[in-house]
Amino acid sequence: MFADLLAGTSQTPITVPSRIPSILAFDSGLGGLTVFSELVRAWPDADFVYAADDAGFPYGRLPESELTARVLAVMDRLVAVHRPDLVVIACNTASTLVLPHLRRRFDMPFIGTVPAIKPAASASRSGRIAILATPATVARDYTRGLVEAYAAQCRVELVGSRRLAGFAEAELRGHPVSDEELMAELAPCFVEDESGRTDVVVLACTHYPLLLERFRRLAPWPVTWIDPAPAIARRMRDVLHRPAAHETVPEDHGGRLAIFTGGEGLDPPLRAALAARGLGQVVVDPIPLVAGH
Ligand code: DGL
C-alpha cells in the first residue's frame, strides 16, 4: 500500500509525454516548497508550477470529509487551468487521505508524500523511532497501517503537532518563533529508557524540513532526520521515465509560477523567499474555504 501511494501504481497506465513535462506540486501552504526544490533539482528543465491552497491552511485541522472535498475542488480548478502531466501532492495530511480519490477522478499520475516509516524502521539501531506530523496525519488509518506493516518491531512515537506547520511558515516569512516554543513541540519525539533512546525522527509534514537546522540544534541528542523529498523527486523521474538526454541541462531559469488560493500573507519577504526558490511569478487565484469544500 505504501508503494502504491508513493508510486501511483493503482491507476491507469502512465502516458509519458515526449515533450518537456508539466509538473504541478501542491500543498496547503509553503511546506511543499521543501519537496518542490528537490523536484526542480532532479529535473531543472521541466515545466513546474507550485500551488499553495493557503485559503485552506492548515489542512491538519480539517475533518476528513471536508479535506477530501476541499482538495478535489481545488484540484479541479488547477487541472483545468494548468493541464499538468503529473501532480505531486507535497503534503502528508492530504496524501494519506485523498490520493485514492484524486486517482479515481483524474487521468494523470499523482505522486503522494506519506510518512517514511519503512525507511525509518530500517535505519534505526535502537528500535525507537518518532513520526513528527500534523495531528491529522498521525490519526490516519493509513499511517497506523504503515506502522503495523513496517515498524511492528519498533517503539514508535506518533507525535502530532498542532503548531509546527504554522511555526515553519513563520520561519520562512522571517518571523521565527522562540527555541522554547519549538522545543515544546519537538520534545515528545525524544524518548529514552534503560535499553535505548530515539535515534530516527521522520519529518512527516512537508513544512518541517523548513525548521530542520533549528531542530538539529535543539535536539537533546543527535538523531537521523528523514526528509522524504529526495525520494519523491526520484519517484517523479521514474514515473515519467526521465530520458538520459535530460541528464545535462541548462541552469534553472528561476521564473516559475506560484499560485495561491488566498494570498493574504504575500508580503515582500515572502515574495523574496519564493523568488529565492525559483518562483519568480506569483498569482492569486482565489478559492475561498467554505464548509464542506
Ligand atoms: N504540509 C502539510 C503536510 O505535509 C501539512 C500542513 C497543514 O496542516 O496544512 O502534512
Image: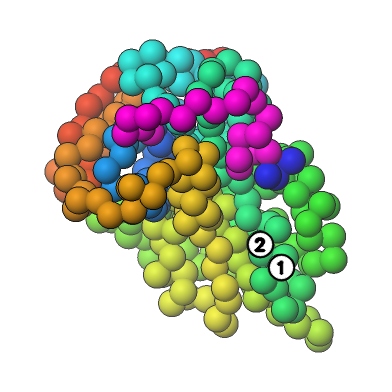
**What predominant SS class does the magenta segment belong to?**
loop
x then y, percent, for residue 28: 44, 35
Residue at the image point whose x is 17% and y is 45% from the top: 253
x then y, percent, for residue 230: 47, 56
Residue at the image point whose x is 21% and y is 32% from the top: 282
The span picked out in magenta is 4-23
Q: Is residue 12 magenta?
A: yes
Q: Is residue 236 magenta?
A: no
Disc 1 versus disc 2: distance between alpha carbons? 5 Å
Q: Is mark 2 within 8 Å of ligand 1?
A: no
Residue at the image point whose x is 68% and y is 44% from the top: 3
Instruction: Determine if residue 245 is in view.
Output: yes
Residue under label 2, please give it.
Answer: 119
Residue under label 1, please give it.
Answer: 122
Give the camera-side residue of 11 and 58. 11
Secondary structure of residue under mark 2: helix
- The image quadrant that residue 47 belongs to is top left
Position of residue 235 relative to residue 221, above or below, is: above
Position of residue 7 relative to residue 125, above or below, is: above
Q: In this view, which residue lies farthest toward the front?
A: 245
Position of residue 131 relative to residue 29, above or below, is: below
Q: Along the horizontal axis of the image, is 224 left or right of 271?
A: right
Secondary structure of residue under mark 1: helix
Q: In this view, which residue lies farthest toward the bottom?
A: 194
**Pointer 1 with pointer 2, Cβ within 8 A:** yes
Instruction: Determine if residue 271 is in view.
Output: no
Residue at the image point whose x is 31% and y is 34% from the top: 20
x then y, percent, for residue 66: 59, 21
Name the kind of residue labelled 2 in the image: Pro
Classify the position of the N terminus by image quarter.
top right
x then y, percent, for residue 9: 65, 34
- Count residues near mark 2 (Cα–Cα under 10 Å), then give few for <14, some for 14-19, many for 20+: some
